[in-house]
Image (cartoon, rainbow, N blue to C red):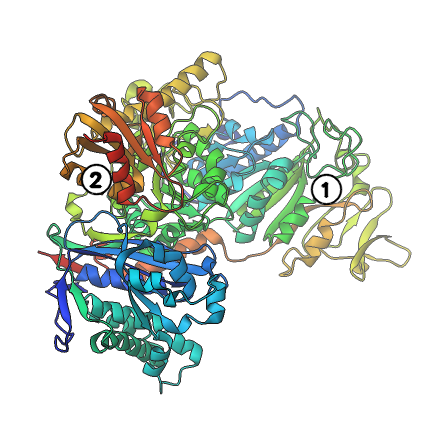
Amino acid sequence: MASTAAAPEVQSGEGMNKKREQMESVVIRFCGDSGDGMQLVGSQFMNTSAILGNDVSTLPDFPAEIRAPIGTLAGVSGYQLNFSSHDIFTPGDAVDTLVAMNPAALKSNVNDLKRGGTLIVNDDEFETSNLQKAGYETNPLLDAKISSNYQLHRVPMTRLTRDAVDGLGLSLKEADRCKNFFSLGLVYWLYDRDRKPTEDEITHKFSKKPAIMEANLRALRAGFNYGFSTESFTTHYNVPRAKLPPGKYKKITGNEATALGLVTGAKLAGKNLFYAGYPITPASDILHELAAMKNFRVRTFQAEDEIAAMSAVVGAAYAGELAITASSGPGICLKGEAIGLGIMMELPMIIVNVQRGGPSTGLPTKTEQSDLLLCYFGRNGDSPIPIIAASGPGDCFDMVQEAMRISVEFMTPVFFLTDGYIANGAEPWMIPNIKDLKPIMVQHPSGKNGQSPDSVTAEGQNGYLPYKRDAKLARPWAVPGTPGLEHRVGGLEKADVTGNVDYSPANHHHMVMTRCKKVAGIADHIPLQDIDGPDSGELLVISWGGTWGAVRTAVRQCQANGKSVSHVHMKYMNPMPRNLGDIIKNFRKVLIPELNTGQLSLLLRARFLVDAVGLNKVQGKPFLVSEVAEKINEMLGGK
Amino acid sequence: MNTETPTLGSPSLPVLTAKDFASDQEIRWCPRCGDYSILAQMKKVLPGLGIPREKFVFVSGIGCSSRFPYYMNTYGMHTIHGRAPAIASGIKISRPDLQVWVITGDGDALSIGGNHFMHMIRRNMDLKIILFNNQIYGLTKGQYSPTSPRGQKTKSTPMGSVDNPLTPLSVAIGSEATFVARSVDVDIKHLSHTLERAASHKGTAFVEVYQDCNVFNSGAFEYATDKSIKGDHIVYLEHGKPLVFGTKVKKGIRLNGMNPEIVELGKGITEDDLLFHDEKLAEPSLAFLLARMRHPEFPEPMGVFRDVQKPIYDHDVNAQIDAAVAKQGEGDLEALFNMGDTWVVE
């Protein structure tokens, strides 16, 4: 839909005694049982707000179990979003409005609600059995701590939804499934949102089930009208449009942007994309997205396991395709051996690692940044590999193309790191102009003469020299089907230049060093590290990956309070930008916030001999801005 | 060699010989290893297939047999243990124009690589896979393998193996294989004919080759190779013909209910009473029954057990691509970017 984001249509009667207040920025969280459809209403609110012109950032948070026992704490699913009239980089720290569909959802989320915040509960669900399942002995809604700390609205959503859909011939179960739209309608009224995008979506989604369509539309309107007409709600709020850079936008998640970036990179390189993967949370959506892009000649292969997926990628790379796999921690562990083969064969390929909580199966649906060292070192032998990390959902689009560029220019596997937070989180993404995208150059020698004349020698494989390197130390990429360039590659150590098997001591030393030098040399072909704030001072905060938003916001807050603090956010993890060491030297202290126990810290301390301090959190959740700001203030003391 | 790019099977191909398929690398198998013979037959068979040399890719895993690609002057990959079927699948899906051969052994295919082996076969990926079965780990110097007989004494089983061995053909047939055959390293005519049959099959073609490891498991297949006795221990399969074998006495295989039995011909039993081989049966039961005939109880069948046509994975993947392009048109980034809800900020 090409809406021009006109000022919100005034559709809520301004009559009655309702006040309308303006707010700059609001954080809402919908939470309920994992069967309550909270992800759906959360993403609908996100869409609508984005279309209205707000800047938006989201944090879906759902359990690993598809359907944990109904009403239990284990089954609580939440969707938080922050929408604003100015630039925002995070889904927000404290929640302004919490919608809790049952006692378990209240219990596990109410502590994140701001004092004085709006608390909307489905009152019908607060009965004995549900209270027991959530571990409440008495009804918390009767507790003075709840009613005095928050603006509590006890709404009988189940009953009101059933009333709204009465007469449509729905079963009770079907009727109750509409109550998420009731809650959405109510919050739409509260924040003065246009119902139309959601009505359109419902109409489209249920076009073959007219009764369900009508029921959801009615529930949405019933919720909206409830806010409008009951006395419980006295005020509603308006969040004006943000001043985003002009352009055409759409909502995008990190996984969507990664898939889009991969297809774009292949197209820019004039190549076909080959994707092999094995289903794994939170990376599977990349497979789903690409499987739907067959008219871009994307071949997707759902392999029998992670090892096969990685192996197929190595095969396809030898065959001349842009070959990709994506996985998460446990899968990346299994891929290690075949990645090593890719490094030995010096073939281009991308391994996407959507990081999640570990070790082992860990926290499949929760975010973490704890695979940096796995990607750096998780193979036998000295096996250097470039690593690129995206900083947010939209950034995945650009950085995965950058990973592809490096991969083909330097003939090497490349890791592309994201995490559960940016993979599932969504933000507005400015649709790029295709002409502005950087081309990706791929060359295949077309015959022995495709190499320089002096390289044709009787010593090679048919006179072809598969390991004769260019100035960047990259080897040529001759593909099967090219007459005269028949050659063999393998996992055994190669003789330099000819690529024949060679175990001799000097050759192995030379080849190990050459592979290291090639990857290190990429530093000359990536941008210098940029810095937010003065390039010298008291404290430098260094972050990487998905923590960008929280750290940038915290540093900006502290800068605004006059603190001597600057921010470096790294996207090129290996090799690191050439000027990083010089930047670090210009600060007295260094803080490295990470969602792990200090992995980047270890690397930077080793490389730059800097006494960096870590801020480490491993709770399966992103940083709050306040956590980072507090640490900055602590390190700067009264300064 | 001519450097034009003829298409697969083009009549204008230059005439190639076995020599054209030999690489310049020194062959490092042990003297008298059965692998030499298989390599020689392969080099003989390929020129006759009508496929340009640059269209062949040989992919292997790890093990003695897996050095094979280094000795072929074609495109080739010597990869990692057990993964050759998966690597070859990546090649074949993305490049259906290539003829891809997988070279593997009993440990590589059935132990560490059992999963990939099974899935490649059930997908009916258009790959040719040759399993060199020597019933031993040779490269690691003599441990028992998943095809070593129970009780075999090796370095890792000094009191004899207590593992039950797998029959490679049974595994392949159980994985829904469309082409299954067996041959022996030293039976060069039979072997080259079997390789030709495999090459011309559309879909996964699986060939088990009994291969003598004369260093660590010498004579394991003597019953099938020694000319003086093999006539009583192997039976050649021919499509539409009865299963007849035996050197001095002419014997045959007859079905007794669901079970095969050995019968002597004459004395009222004629060839018409015997089991007739049919490699084209839709159901794999007969092929499975033949695969279960093991030495010393039965003569072991040699030849093509099964040769049927089924949908081929890589063909179908590419057919879906073509169908999507035909229906939606060639992918357009502009359209893709603008799909779904969009809004304009001015």
> Could you tell me the amino acid type at mark 1?
Pro
For mark 2, does the 10 Å Cα neighbourhood hold few (<14), some (14 to 19), or many (20 or more) residues? some
Name the element at disc 1.
loop
> Could you tell me the amino acid type at mark 2?
Pro
Q: In the figure, is residue A495 to the left or right of B234?
A: left
Q: Which residue is mark 2?
A: A439
Q: Give the label on residue B165, or none.
A: 1
Vertical placement of residue A108 versus B59, above or below: below
Name the element at disc 2.
loop
Q: In the figure, is residue B54 to the left or right of B333?
A: right
Picture residue at 58% right of the left edge, 21% below the top? B28
- Where is residue A113, by image quadrant? bottom left
Picture residue at 56% right of the left edge, 53% below the top? B122
**Callouts 1 and 2 on one subunit:** no
Picture residue at 81% right of the left edge, 34% below the top? B228
In front of the other: A530 or A438? A530
